[in-house]
Amino acid sequence: MLRGLLIVLGILVVLLAVWMIVGYWRRRQSGGGWNSFRDWVRKPEWKASMSDYFAMREAAVEELSRRPPEELVEMLLDSDFDIARCAIEAGGVRMVPALLAAITDPRFRKPCGGDEQGGGGGLWERKEPLETVLDCLVPLAPEEAGPLVAPLVRDPSKAIRLEAARVIGAIGSDACVEPFVTACRADNDDLVARAMIGVMWGRKANRYSPRFRAAAFEAIVPWVDLSRGYFGDQPAQCLLVLDRTRAIELLTSSQYMVAGSKALRMILSSLREADVVVNEGQLLGLASALECMEMDNRNNSALAEVYRLLGRCNSADAEAALQRGAASSSADVREGVAEARLTRAGITSPFEFAGNRWDEGGWESLSAPQRHVMAVRILIDQVNNGGISQFLINSSGRRWRDAIEGFRAMGCSRDAEMFQQVADMFGPAGPSVDDETRHKKLSELLPDDGDGPFEPLDKEFYEDRGGRVARLLDYALANADHFREPEGTRGQALDKAKGAEAEDRA
């Protein structure tokens, strides 16, 4: 009895602490405090407080996930429901009966905050608790939820319709056929997109009924050519999930394999990622046609995908096409050619290979080319996402020396100069490898108002005049032996990640 009471009190203490931090964070967000990434950089103590918050949140989730499902689902009615939602996700299939019961419980249809405007709480906005219930059902996708969720695709609430479409797409039972088709025929592009997202959620379980596969396939086909809306590669990917044979026949037909088509790049990318072998003659024809067209972003991207697929072909004609692509003025096209040449060299992904090595033995176990490739790749991703400040504020900033060395080894001398200039701002020793120390110095470099010292360098980096990704891939190819297993051991599965620094990877 006493032990149980202490456990409950412990949970309440954790929840109270989390509630205080979340409330403080939300007040700061709405009160003119730390409202931007710049403020995050300028206030190192905020990062520390949020680290404490997430640590306590994780502890609360772990404790709550052991509670009865009915109790957890009931907590979704609260305004600050985020931790209960995470605990339900951690609870898995044992939560299904309680979630299903909530679908028809009128309490879960009342707007958050008790008014018509709704309001959401915590870190995840929602208007009705039913939204959260449906969100929790997506990864579980129980077949018995189909009949209960099906009517919600026509619900008056747009938010409920969107979540219902995602659940229906993930379940894929006979009961989901009519609502899925209804969603795909809707005028609302968001509803169509959510339904297709659901299909991608459910693909690993391979649970779709034959009737659902056939009906969903037909419902998605009209969206492939992107004339009715833009969904990226989702339509093509969904078709390959639902009926691979039929999808390949359709997507490689003359109807879709047309140079200049809006959907060509997405179709080619989907086929490549699904390891579909595309006819070499068809690819060569597309390459010739695209090379003669105006090289705008769309055609450049499509041509790059053609070259990536030609990397699986070893004919003289394929090699001639790759040589033409290597001389292109487009960085995207040259990047596609570089990836094709890596494929020919038996290298699937230099980043994945080096990343696995990093996980196995730590950063210092990597060879110099492996460190260069990983450091530069991480820097590119971080800077493109949030600027030089983001690269430095995260654990990625520990790798600044290897990144500069990598740029020099790749032949990107201007990039090396730029980041040496950044490093010099931190003093003779450069940025500290200690995250807190580096963050504190970084905060001191930013002015209270106006552009920071990195703004001009960020802008120059984004222009990417040198096509640095293509050069990075060429560097990996020049050091191919560092990015593939030795002869006799290729194809063997690598051990699970066990390096101490694995969690710091970008």
Image: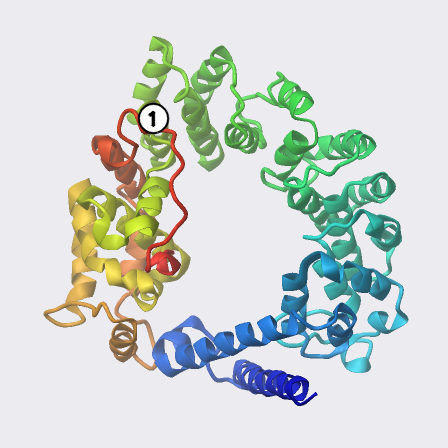
Q: Residue furthest left?
A: 428
Look at the numbered disc 1 and give the secondary structure of its residue. loop
- Where is residue 198 shown, x and y percent of the image? 70, 46
Residue 49 falls in image quadrant: bottom left
378 with respect to 190 (left or right): left
Q: Locate the C terminus by quadrant.
A: bottom left
Taking 222 as reference, is 130 above or below it? Answer: below
> What is the tally of numbered marks visible in this picture?
1
The residue at the point 85 percent across, 55 percent down is 152
- Where is residue 288 shown, x and y percent of the image? 43, 16
Observer-nearest of 167 and 73: 73
Observer-nearest of 483 and 384: 483
The residue at the point 16 percent across, 46 percent down is 408
Residue 417 falls in image quadrant: bottom left
Observer-nearest of 149 and 218: 149
Circle 1 Cα neighbour tier, 10 Å, few/some/many (<14 / 14–19 / ≥20)? some
- Where is residue 342 shown, x and y percent of the image? 32, 29
89 with respect to 378 (left or right): right
Question: How has the structure been colored for display?
Answer: rainbow
469 with respect to 304 (left or right): left
- The amino acid marked with disc number 1 is Gly
- Where is residue 151 shown, x and y percent of the image? 89, 52
Q: Which residue is mark 1?
A: 346
Taking 103 as reference, is 360 above or below it? Answer: above
The residue at the point 63 percent across, 73 percent down is 83
Residue 202 falls in image quadrant: top right
The residue at the point 35 percent across, 79 percent down is 42
Taking 483 as reference, is 122 above or below it? Answer: below
| Residue 128 seen by the camera | no
Q: Locate the N terminus by quadrant.
A: bottom right
| Residue 422 seen by the camera | yes
Observer-nearest of 7 and 265: 7
